[in-house]
Amino acid sequence: MLLVAGCQRVTWKEFSSKEGRFSVLVPGTPSEQTQNLDTGVGAIDLHFFIVEQDGFQYLVSYNDYPDAMVREADADKVLDGARDGVVANVQGRLLNEVKVWLADYPGRELRIRIPEGRQTMRTRLYFVGNRLYQVGVLSAEDSAAADEISKFLNSFKLQTP
């Protein structure tokens, strides 16, 4: 009985957020939180969804920038700032960065080493209209679960309002 219980597979299911206008496959039910941040462009609400499963932390977050800032914004500069913010927030070191796209929207895929706790974060940032999305996985540095991480990252989809 114990052997069977220990071998149960985690069921991945689609999670969607109507307000966030996205869907993603996750291995559990996300907890949802909102945090108000005071930034150089004003107060911003950061919405995030987290699933912790078997030593992994799966995360989707989004925030909306003020329309005035977006009208004058350069997508590469916004993504550069987001990248720098993510690396600083986790007190990590950027290992790799690749430009990616989600439909017609620009993005970046980052691999970050976090010395505290010997962890690695693989995350994607997408700039969609006035919204910045972050989709990422935090795992042990020596984790061999690249397939599950890719499954999560590749499942992220935008939903039409």
Image (tube, rainbow, N blue to C red):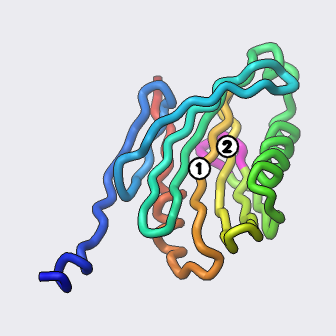
| x, y percent for residue 159 | 46, 33
How many labels, in total? 2
Q: Are marks 1 and 2 in contact (CB under 8 Å)?
A: yes
The amino acid sitting under disc 2 is: Tyr
Query: Magenta residues: mostly which secondary structure?
Result: strand
Quarter of the image for residue 118 reads bottom right
Location of residue 98 with respect to 34 vertically, above or below:
below
Q: Is residue 157 left or right of residue 39?
A: left
- Label 1 neighbour load within 10 Å: few <14, some 14-19, many 20+: many
Task: State the residue at coordinates (75%, 15%).
Answer: 67
Q: Residue, x 49% and y 47% (percent of image)? A: 50
- As for residue 102 lying within the magenta part, the answer is yes
Q: Earlier in the sequence, mark 1 or mark 2?
A: 2
Expressed as whole percent of the image width and height from the top left, the position of residue 140 reads 60, 73
**Depth order, front residue of 69/7:** 7
Q: Is residue 28 above or below residue 80?
A: below
The kind of residue tagged 1 is Val
Residue located 73% across and 53% down the image: 108
Horizontally, residue 35 falls left or right of residue 112, namely left
Q: Which residue is mark 2?
A: 126
Name the residue furthest bottom: 3
Which quadrant of the rendered structure holds the N terminus?
Answer: bottom left
Q: Residues within 10 Å of mark 2 (few under 14, many from 20)?
A: many
Q: Secondary structure at mark 2?
A: strand
Residue span colored magenta = 101-107
Q: Nearer the viewer, residue 69 or 30?
A: 30
Extreme residue toward the top, this view: 68
Quadrant housing residue 73:
top right
Q: Residue 46 appears at what percent x and percent y? A: 63, 31
Dividing the picture into quarters, in which one does residue 12 lie? bottom left
Residue corresponding to mark 1:
135
